Amino acid sequence: MNSTQSSLTTPSPSITLRFLAAPTDVLSAGSQGVHGGRVLEWIDKAAYACAVGWSGTYCVTAYVGHIHFTRPIPSGHMVEVRSRIVYTGRSTMHIVNEVLSANPRDGLFTRACDCLVIFVAMDENRKSQPVTPYVPVTDEEKRVQQAAISRIDLRKVIEDEMIAQTYSSNSTAPEITHRFLAKPTDINWGGNVHGGTAMEWIDEAATSVTMAWSGERTVAIYAGGVRFYRPVHIGDLVEVTARLVRTDARTMGVMVHLRAGDPRERNEKLPLAIHASMTYVAVDYDGNTLPARPFTPQTDEDRALHQHAMRLRELRAEYEPMPLVAPTQHKVRFTD
């Protein structure tokens, strides 16, 4: 077999998407850059392409975590989303994603965010199926694989902590709910709503509640514990509820639940599809961070959720997962 034939039969563990950030990627007039939900959508699409390329079959998003937004991406910037498989389970693919951008006039890419996304390979009956094991070769590939493995226990503890919480009407916390029907333009190639689209909806609801509370423009700086429980279909009634649960000197913590189901069924509560934790800051017109308006929990439930949010912070510090990406040593040009 020649080298060309070999490359056609060996799946690639990585993929890079490159495109221009458009004015329609900005959520509100006057924003410094693309909103976090659109960046999450880009990440999910690149990671999906990477997962499908490796597994050779349809895949679904299972988890997105540890997303740190380090700087805004202005409209008109060239964007590069790099996705690579770093660890595989029986049917899961752990994918590290980096988002970089550059002003096309100087062509210097710098990192805007990174995160870990987990996809599950599915067969034609929508059952999980085994994937080809990924075997790291270089020292850096081995290091990143260990970094992904170091997050497994933390992810399980965080998920259990999030599921155990109660969200009822016994609250005075700021809360906003967006309701709409899932459209045909929202779906992916498997017929379900794209995970990235759903994450964009989550960011929009969380942005709404933090802007209403602060009275300022707000931006996402962190997203974690984004757990996918069930798919969302065309025509489903989608209900995205974002509740403010804590504030500190500058940040606002928000818990978001996305529920979806058949609007013809008279359910008291739609089935839970996605649960996420988000952190925002308010910014002025120059993009400078503003002090957060303090939120004081009033009810027992509000106080419990405030403690829950603080516990999530403690867990991340307690487990101290290894970094997924190495520090950027230099800026990368288009031609590199």
Image (cartoon, grey):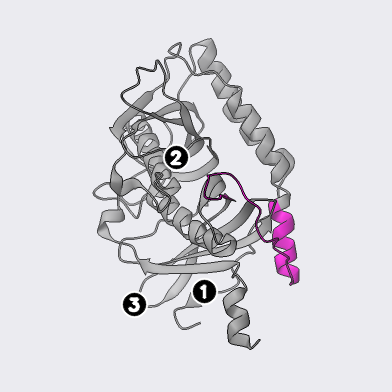
In the image: residue 150, left or right of residue 13: right
What type is the residue that disc 2 sits on? Tyr
Residue 255 in view in this figure: no
Asked if disc 3 and disc 1 are in contact, CB closer than 8 Å, the reply is no
Q: Position of residue 10 (x, y in %)?
A: 62, 73
Which residue matches tag 3? 105
Give the camera-side residue of 162 and 111: 162
* Mark 1, other Cα within 10 Å: few <14 / some 14–19 / many ≥20: few
Which residue matches tag 1? 331
Stretch of the chain drawn in magenta? 120-148
Q: Position of residue 31 (x, y in %)?
A: 30, 50
In the image: residue 77, left or right of residue 308: left
- Does residue 154 sit above or below 32 in this rendering? above
SS category of the residue bearing label 3: loop
Give the camera-side residue of 332 and 284: 332
Residue 203 image label? none
- Please tell me whether residue 131 belongs to the stretch shown in magenta: yes
In the image: residue 92, left or right of residue 221: right
- Does residue 172 sit above or below 102 in this rendering? above
* Mark 3, other Cα within 10 Å: few <14 / some 14–19 / many ≥20: few
Which residue matches tag 2? 280
Precedes in sequence: disc 3 or disc 1: 3
Q: Position of residue 196 (x, y in %)?
A: 43, 48
